[in-house]
Image (spheres, rainbow, N blue to C red):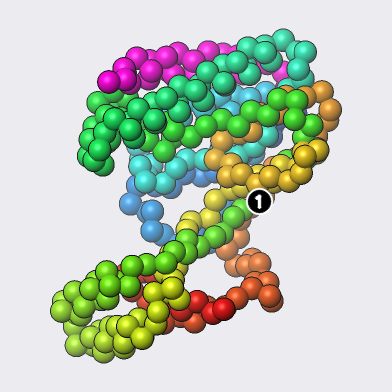
Amino acid sequence: MTDIKGLYDKLSADLNLLEKLLYATEPMMALVSRIPPVIKGEEQATIKQITPELSSGLLAMKLAAEAFQDIHIKHPFSQKSARRYVGIIQLHPTQENCPEIVKCISDINATKAEIEHAVVTENETRQARFSAVHDNCPGVMTVHLYRKIHCLEDELVKSVRFSWQRKDSLHQPNKIELLGQIISEQERASPDNKLALTQLHHKVATTSEQELRIRRPVKVQPAANIVRASGLKTVTAPLPIIVVQKEVIEANEVSEFIASHVRKQRSDKNKNIVLGSFTGRNIERLMK
């Protein structure tokens, strides 16, 4: 069995080293925003607005160090919603501490990956994986423990621009299982809800499994659009992105998110037919 406790101790030491290096380094550019964290118990609250708290220069370097160190549960914040720090730091390849920062980040990412691989491959059940993490890495938030630090070294980055992504999770269900779940819900439902469930059952039963889709809303998240000489790449950006190169890049801080500013749906996008709502998810029929 992998020594997860030993890996965790190494990760903690490397994170402490990275913090010291970042504190002592003058960046070419640094823009890092703290996204206000979700309070425990408010995970399902409707998000109408998110106002990032921007830091720049040396203050951004300190905030980035805090972001990379932030792998533990913190009161009174949610354990189900990740805390996020969105931003960009550019370092010159020849400046002091830069090679050490790059190596340290590489070591941190490798250790994180090794911990995750050991937990997933050496434990068969969800409970066993939970115990493997929390017995060896006291007080951690697993999603924070596993998330990697993006470090782009000499990749000819032209620009890094941040935005807010709003995407739904869409998947094809097992029709028989879905019908069984609807029947089980019917048996517990009040007379007012039974009719709607009966109608939904009929609609699902008369739709082929290949056409069925379940849509679940996914919470808004920050993303980075990275333009390099090789093209555009979009990545989720819960942690500051480090870019190491001498060429100046264009960048912006993440803007305020306002839910009412909804981007219009593309006119050529297929519109599925909504058959009904079930356990907070839309059941749809795919339109071809």
Visible residue check, residue 53? no
Q: Residue at 50%, 62% (x, y): give it.
A: 168
Q: Residues within 10 Å of mark 1 (few under 14, many from 20)?
A: many
In magenta stretch: residue 3: yes
Give the image location of residue 223, x and y in percent: 61, 47
Q: Residue at 63%, 12% (x, y): give it.
A: 100
Q: Which span is picked out in magenta?
A: 1-28
175 or 249, nearer to the observer: 175
116 or 59, nearer to the observer: 116
Q: Amino acid at mark 1?
A: Ser
Identify the main secondary structure in magenta: helix
In magenta stretch: residue 138: no
- Say whether residue 99 is left or right of residue 190: right
Visible residue check, residue 179? yes
Give the image location of residue 257, x and y in percent: 61, 55
Q: Quadrant of residue 31?
A: top right
Give the image location of residue 178, x and y in percent: 29, 71
